Image (cartoon, helix red, strand yellow):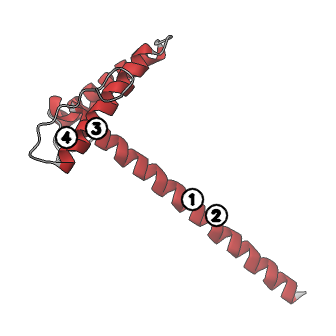
Amino acid sequence: MIQQLNKHSWELEHYKRKMKRFEVSDRKAENRTKIQLGGLILKSGLAELLEINPEDDLQLDPLARDKATTLLGALLHVTEQLQHDSDGALKQECSYRGMKAMMQQFMRSKDPNSSCKLNLNSSGESL
C-alpha cells in the first residue's frame, strides 16, 4: 500500500515537472515571437520615424508613452485596412514589400559596402 502511494506520488510529481517544462517552453516561444515582432517594427522604420529610441521607457515616460500610442494607432490603422482588404491585394502588396525589404537587408548583410537595390516583380521574383 505504501509502495503504491509512493509510486503514485512520484508519478504525480513527474507529470507536474513535465507540465512545468511545457509551460516554460510555451513562455519562451511567446517571448521569442514578441522579440521578433519588435525587430520587425525596427526594420520597418516606424520606431525611427516616431523617434522611439531603444532607451525609451514606453510605459513610464509620458513623452515616450505618447510615441507608443501613436505607434499603436498606426498598427491599428494597418490592421483595419487589412481587415477590409476583401480581394487580398493589400495583403499581397504588404507581403511583396516585406520580402523586398528582407532581401535587401540580407544582401547588405552579405556585402555591407553594397548599396544594392533589389528589383523584384510583383510576385517577388528577381528581375
| Amino acid type, residue under disc 1 in the picture | Glu
Q: How far apart are labels 3 and 2 at the CA level?
A: 40 Å
Nearer mark to the viewer, of 3 and 4? 3
> At numbered mark 4, what does the secondary structure look like: helix, strand or loop?
loop
Nearer mark to the viewer, of 3 and 2? 3
Residue that badge 2 annotates: 19
Which circle marks residue 12 in the picture? none
Which circle marks residue 103 in the picture? 3
**Which quarter of the rendering shows the N terminus?**
bottom right
Task: Say whether disc 4 or disc 1 marks the residue closer to the N-terminus.
Answer: 1
Q: Are marks 1 and 3 in contact (CB under 8 Å)?
A: no
Task: Say whether disc 2 or disc 4 marks the residue closer to the N-terminus.
Answer: 2
Indicate the position of residue 120 as horizontal and vertical percent values: 29, 26
* Residue occupying the point 20% across, 50% down: 110
| Amino acid type, residue under disc 4 in the picture | Asp
Which circle marks residue 23 in the picture? 1
Q: Are marks 1 and 2 in contact (CB under 8 Å)?
A: yes
Q: How far apart are labels 1 and 2 at the CA level?
A: 6 Å
> Given the current orientation, which residue lies at the most extreme front position?
127
